[in-house]
């Protein structure tokens, strides 16, 4: 039955080969587990208690992480839906099973002093590309925009008189982000340098242009951010999203309220923004442990 199910995943649900392989592994492991119980258990007679035993076994005996256990349960849920649809079983024992809670990882960020050192270093190249690269770092750090948002910006989204940027976020929702006089000047300098560099015109239609005159690509902005952040931090994560986290952390640490940060980031839920309060608390604990003589 498992083999037929995996063929169904490929042909009907168009799942990737990796997903098919992972689901197959999980189902065979579960089958081995319930057959080892020695009670003549079959797929048709498996109940919720057996599945709960399997979860405990995976987490305690095999030390699997919650994300891995959740993937295995996803395979089991999909398989039982298939069995019910094909008439192989009349009940779905996974319907009452909840996945284990995943531990939330705190977002990585670069400290203010490191970013200030980078922006004031004077090590960016001369000319159009250097101005663009420095502007990308400054803009991401100053606005908290997502990579896709900054890449889709157009010149008309820079509202000079209001000193704001109109950002189009997820599900085409728009928001306004205020910008500093420094950032506005950097934007104007970049535009002037860009238009002088491509005085005969360029193919791209967005605000950020690559060296060949086309719209800057996602991999190009990732490389620009990664290479420049590597000059001031050794941390593994050095992506554009790290600068978004750096923006939010800096705002919170300097007195901004969560609702304001939520609006600036374009989060639909305040719960998403609250992760930064945990981040600040971790920083607070670290400071305490280093500074207090009895810690």
Image: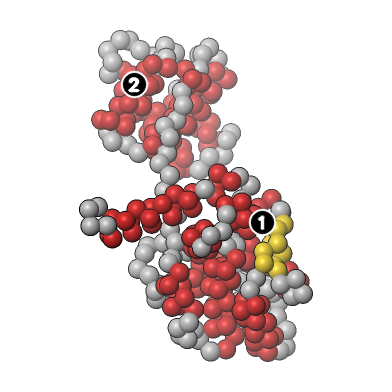
What residue is shown with label 2?
Answer: 53
Label 2 vs 1, first from the N-terminus: 2
Report the residue at 49% width, 53% height from top. Answer: 276
Mark 1: few/some/many CA within 10 Å (<14, 14-19, 20+): some
- Which image quadrant: the N terminus? top left
Q: Nearer the viewer, residue 53 or 5?
A: 53
Alpha carbon distance from label 2 to label 1: 43 Å
So how many labels did they put on this image? Answer: 2
Percent x, y for residue 237? Answer: 41, 61
Describe residue 292's horizontal placement relative to residue 89 as left or right.
left
Q: Which mark is residue 169?
A: 1
Q: Residue furthest left?
A: 294
Select label 2 or label 1 by which is in front.
1
**Helix, strand or loop at disc 2?**
helix
Percent x, y for residue 13? Answer: 57, 35
Q: Is residue 261 above or below residue 46?
A: below
Disc 2, disc 1: CB below 8 Å? no
**Helix, strand or loop at disc 1?**
loop
Q: Nearer the viewer, residue 59 or 11?
A: 59
Residue 22 visible in the current orientation: no
């Amino acid at each position: 039955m498992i083999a037929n199910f995996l063929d169904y995943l490929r042909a009907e649900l168009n799942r990737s080969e990796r997903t098919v392989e992972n689901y197959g592994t999980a189902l065979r492991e579960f089958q081995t587990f319930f057959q080892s119980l020695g009670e003549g258990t079959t797929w048709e007679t498996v109940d919720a208690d057996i599945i709960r035993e399997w979860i405990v076994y995976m987490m305690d005996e095999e030390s699997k992480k919650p994300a891995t256990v959740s993937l295995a349960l996803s395979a089991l849920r999909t398989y039982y839906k298939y069995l019910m649809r094909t008439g192989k079983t009349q009940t779905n024992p996974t319907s009452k099973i909840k996945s284990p809670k995943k531990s939330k990882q705190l977002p990585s960020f670069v400290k203010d002093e490191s970013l200030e050192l980078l922006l004031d270093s004077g090590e960016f190249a001369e000319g159009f590309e250097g101005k663009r690269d420095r502007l990308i770092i400054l803009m991401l750090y100053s606005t908290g925009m997502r990579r896709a948002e900054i890449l889709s910006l157009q010149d008309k989204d820079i509202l000079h008189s209001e000193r704001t940027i109109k950002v189009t976020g997820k599900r085409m929702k728009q928001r306004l982000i205020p910008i500093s006089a420094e950032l506005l000047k950097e934007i104007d300098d970049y535009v002037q340098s860009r238009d002088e560099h491509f005085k005969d015109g360029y193919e791209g239609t967005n605000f950020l242009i690559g060296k060949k005159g086309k719209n800057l690509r996602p991999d190009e902005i990732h490389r620009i951010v990664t290479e420049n952040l590597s000059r001031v931090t050794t941390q593994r994560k050095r992506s554009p999203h790290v600068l978004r986290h750096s923006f939010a952390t800096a705002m919170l640490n300097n007195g901004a309220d969560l609702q304001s940060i939520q609006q600036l980031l374009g989060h639909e839920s305040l719960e998403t923004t609250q992760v930064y309060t945990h981040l600040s608390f971790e920083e607070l604990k670290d400071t305490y442990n280093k500074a207090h003589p009895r810690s």
